Amino acid sequence: MADASGGFISPEFVGRDRICGPGSLYTTSRHLLLETPVPPLAADRRPPLVVTEQINQTRQIVWQAQRRGSKVGFVPTMGALHVGHLSLIQAAREECDFVVVSIFVNPTQFGPQEDLTKYPRPLAHDLKLCEEAGVNVVFHPTVETMYPTGFQTFVEVGEVSEVLEGKCRPGHFRGVATVVLKLFHAVPADFAYFGQKDYQQQAIIRQMCRDLDVPIEIRVCPTVREPDGLALSSRNVYLNSEERRSALALHRSLQLAKKLISAGHTDLTAIRAEMFAELTKTPRVRAEYATLIHPETLEEVPELQPRLVGVVAARVGATRLIDNLIIEA
Ligand code: AMP
């Protein structure tokens, strides 16, 4: 369904997360809602993977592909690829003839106390996964390439970036919007693929593209989860086994909101309190927020709406996790 602003959330994705089957590289095809493991592409069907580091070179390759008539799909990532990322690559491959993935751990979106230096960077494994997934180009710039000495221009998106993560992580979305716009200039694709997992991020990117007339269509793909409901995240590797168990509180909190709304509860203040309590009562979990918001404005609406988004953020041990769920009343 195209929203009024030209953003895009495919109707079959709304409220339908995907469960990651054991041992499957991918979980589902874009058009199937249940688990259909999709193996890596056979070696003779994979395009040769080109790895680029330079902005101009990458742009030329994309333009060349487009001149040949290819639709180009782009998947921006910070690497440490998992099935969630691969599902975006898969969606891009289904819709486009040529797929570019960027791998760049963007320093400007990390706060001073955050995990920039310890963020996982398993590049060789990431490249192998990209090759097996049929990616054409991996753009892997250095920090110096993206932020050369003297860099001083940043993108600030307004209200949608001020709430939730924007409040908890000051400056985070300024870094995200800036790097994504820069990546869009390096990779002037036809379509770019983002995960619903980072709900506020996709809303901000869509807002930025509308406001700054970026000629790239944004696709939002469903969250891929472990069979027990934990949303896949590159940060899950930080969790020890007890924290891994505690981390399920985020999913439980969202499911509780969904259950209460389906059961006819309409008092959003009470539901929000229950969501928060579900986090706080779990050992090793420090809740940051648990609330219900409007899907587009991201405001905490006072009354039940046909569609709301449950959003949660918490520290589990030292690891900060977020999750969300679209809830239809
Ligand atoms: P990151 O590498 O964390 O910056 O994520 C790159 C892209 O992958 C973003 O658009 C994320 O929303 C998306 N992503 C991360 N985790 C998941 C997941 N579990 N399911 C679907 N997409 C995801």
Image: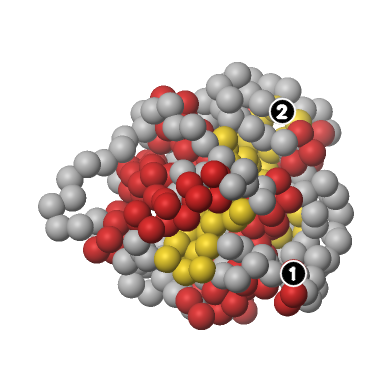
Percent position (x, y) of residue 222?
69, 48
The residue positioned farthest toward the front in the image shown:
68
**Secondary element at image label 2:** loop
Amino acid at circle 2: Met
The residue carrying mark 2 has its beta carbon less than 8 Å from ligand 1: no
Residue 152 falls in which quadrant of the image? top left
Q: Residue at x 35, y 56 (%)?
A: 55
Residue 45, which numbered label?
1
Up/down of 202 relative to 75, above or below: above
Q: Residue 196 at what x, y percent from top left?
A: 62, 45
- The x, y position of residue 17, in whole percent, is 74, 49
Any part of residue 60 in sight: yes
Q: Nearer the viewer, residue 298 or 276?
A: 298
Q: Which mark's residue is nearer the viewer, 1 or 2?
A: 1
- Quadrant (top left, top right, bottom left, bottom right) of the N terminus: top right
Residue at (51%, 68%) from the top-left corner? 50
Q: Does residue 284 show up? A: no
SS state under label 1 = helix
Mark 2, residue position:
1
Residue visible at 45% across and 75% down in the picture: 121
